[in-house]
Image (cartoon, rainbow, N blue to C red):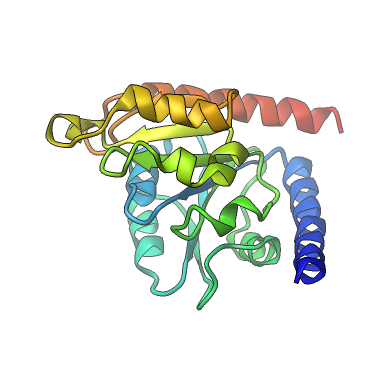
Amino acid sequence: MVALEARILAKNDAGAAKNRAWLAGREILALNLVSSPGAGKTTLLERTIKDLKDEVPLFVLEGDQATANDGERIRAAGAPAVQVNTGTGCHLEADMVARGLSQLRPSAGSVVMIENVGNLVCPAMFDLGERAKVVILSVTEGEDKPLKYPHMFRAAEIMVLNKTDLLPHVDFDVDRAIANAREVNPDIAVLRLSARTGEGLDSWYGWLREQRTAAARAAMQI
């Protein structure tokens, strides 16, 4: 079992390296958005597209087990999207992303958002060639999620604490959630926002701009 898992991950890592080189050659920033189902990934993408589409070319790969619902929502918001359905699979893999990119055809200097299947377990293990994983935690979930799913929070560069507009109505300790995330990943950045009301989105957009600049600089050094 261990040997089989190692072979699967090695094959995926080779594909991820090809994706990363392909993206770098075009100065494209790719981000892997991961969360539990219902944490607000698609809503955050919709709001980001509407607010930044005149500033940044945005493209989206939508990962789900079934249906094209999220892809349709993204296109309605104003961004090109390719739906990648995994069937019984619980995560996207590098070869799926490669096929999706060939259909999506993102322009040079653009941003590709990869919305992974809603799952805090398997996506932590699979590199897709992205620059960073963005883990989204909703305040409607428990603040102990980072401790329950440490591999995901350890793999992420940033934690987006979403649905902060609901804090007056739920029993959620923000400080404890952040402390738990930093217990498993001391370097993780944290943003608090509400994709519904727009609170905190300026910080999210600022982080995206910084990542886009950093990706362009890294590509120039290759």
Q: Quadrant of residue 47?
A: top left
Query: Residue drawn 37% across and 22% down?
Result: 202
- Looking at the rendered image, the quarter that the N terminus falls into is bottom right
Query: Residue drawn 66% across and 45% down?
Result: 130
| Residue 139 as seen in the image, left or right of residue 152 | left
Near-viewer residue (141 or 95) = 141
Image mark count: 0
Say above or below: 58 vs 157: below
| Residue 149 as seen in the image, left or right of residue 68 | right
Where does residue 53 sit, x and y in percent of width and height?
Answer: 43, 39
Where does residue 14 sit, x and y in percent of width and height?
Answer: 82, 58
Say above or below: 50 vs 122: above
Where does residue 21 sit, x and y in percent of width and height?
Answer: 80, 47
| Residue 2 as seen in the image, left or right of residue 111 | right
Near-viewer residue (179 or 218) = 179
Can residue 30 be seen at all in this image of the molecule? yes
- Looking at the rendered image, the quarter that the C terminus falls into is top right
Spot the residue most to the right: 222
Can residue 112 be seen at all in this image of the molecule? no
Where does residue 79 sit, x and y in percent of width and height?
Answer: 44, 51
Query: Residue drawn 14% across and 29% down?
Result: 168
Query: Residue drawn 23% across and 38% down?
Result: 196
Spot the residue most to the bottom: 87
